Amino acid sequence: MPNYDAKKKGSILFIVPDTYQDDNYFPLGPAYLASVLRLAGHKVEIYSQDIFHQPNEELADYLDNNNFDAVGVGFLAARYVETMRPLASIVNGHKKKAKFILGGHGPTAIPEYILKDTAADIIVLGEGEKVIAPLVDDILNRKDLRKRDGIAFRVGNKVIVNKSVAPIANLDEIPFPAWDLFPIEKYFDRSLFIGSEPDDKVFPIATSRGCVGRCSFCYRMEKGIRLRSLDNIFKEMKLLNSRYGITYFRFSDEMLLPSLSRIKEFVLMLKKLKIPVKYSCNARVELAKNKEILKMLKASGCKFLNLGLESLNQNVLNLMGKRTTVEDNYRAVENTIAAGIHPGLNFIWANPGDTRKSLRDIVKFLIKYDTLGQLRTVRPPTPFPGSPLYYQAIQDKKLAGPADFFDKFKNSERLTVNFTDLPDDEVYSALFAANSFLIKNHFNKRVKLFKENKKACSLKAEAMIDSFKRVYFPKTEADLKFRGSRHYLKK
């Protein structure tokens, strides 16, 4: 983006909230915003609770002993009750003159509720790179925020939502993330991924924003897809390799390669990089139906292709708005495995139209195509605020609004809204039986194929099954802390 010449220079703190786990993903959002603010001449600090797990009391002391003009936090709705409410209380109690700014997917869809509930001062709506530097200038110069597009803000008990800002058309204008402000080596230690070796350094990179789809369970801040130029992407990859030794790139895009021409150019440019590259990426199943494309991806270093399959029932897929078929799912996974790439098998069950049979079909599929790259289990959909499923739940009177959502949402492994015709207890019983079977099968397969220790695998399976049992049939609040099998295996 073009440099922004602020009249005054401010001091901004970004807090990366604790996610209470050790497999941390480098936070690209605040890293991009920090880079923009530094280009505008501001001082930026990062408080990495995600890495160091500092308690909120320690954060309070840090705020007491430092002065900032703004304190920023981005978050997803899934962590709101657990993380953001207590964090907001600490920030409000110790920020002194600083403006408390929120951003990201979590608050953008429901700014009125979030501002009143957290008592934060401002929410940046949607993408923040175009808004954040002028907003800080407004704060420093005490300007009228009603004239600043792309934000919502609180004046006492009143919330004002300004008009939105158009998404950034040319993503190449956004400066590279401010990696140096973060404890970056700590992320290397915690981010081994499928197909990586112990000496690989794994790191995320974003090459686009958005998606061509509009699935019912997905919340997106804007429509459509925008792409960085491949020249810009490879410049960043070279820099990450030369500066930090990155050899495995986790492309975080919802759709890394939306067209055949871009795929061919991408693979060709990878060959010209002259550095050993491995990578993982996300894709719609249409891409994986093409065997030639998969061969090119495999040859260029692709180790893992994460596929949004979601269901094996055509009626459910249609109701989701997936615009794919059951046959597409089968062909995509079979072709991916045949190409020598691990497929990511993503399914959710308890959607509108789901039945016991549709769950049995998913379980059979996951057993048949388990390459042991990941242990995949099945979870219900969560109608996060802003998603079509959220508004459907409100229309069907299964949710009354954001307050009701956050009251009912406990964990992504549990029902927030039951969209099936089955009672809740039968949904949980079906999920417990399905996931127990998948876990046992996965570890038995590891013993047979990899000759892993049978007793150790059995203990892992039993512990994981017990965790699922407790999250489905909780007796205490602590039973709801389980974060799913993928996090479990990394502990």
Image: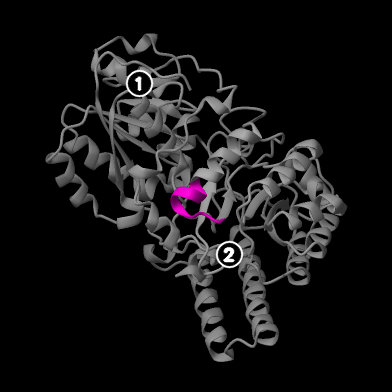
What predominant SS class does the magenta segment belong to? Answer: helix
The residue that label 2 is drawn on is: 196
Residue depth check, mark 2 versus mark 1: number of the one nearer the observer: 2
Please state if 84 lies on the left or on the right of 294 as rendered.
left
Q: Secondary structure at mark 2?
A: loop
Is residue 19 at all visible to an observer of this figure? no
Residue 365's spot in the image, x, y percent? 78, 66
| Above or below 82: residue 126 | above
Name the image quarter holding residue 367.
bottom right
Q: Circle 1 sits on which residue?
A: 153
Q: Is residue 321 left or right of residue 94?
A: right
Of callouts 2 and 1, the N-terminal one = 1
Q: Nearer the viewer, residue 261 or 468?
A: 261
Write the residue at 48% across / 14% down. Answer: 163
Q: Which residues are magenta?
A: 240-247
Going by the numbered disc 1, the residue's amino acid type is Phe
Q: Looking at the image, which residue sits at the far left?
A: 65
Quarter of image, res 171: top right
Task: List x then y, in percent, for residue 261.
Answer: 80, 36
| Residue 402 % position (x, y) | 47, 36
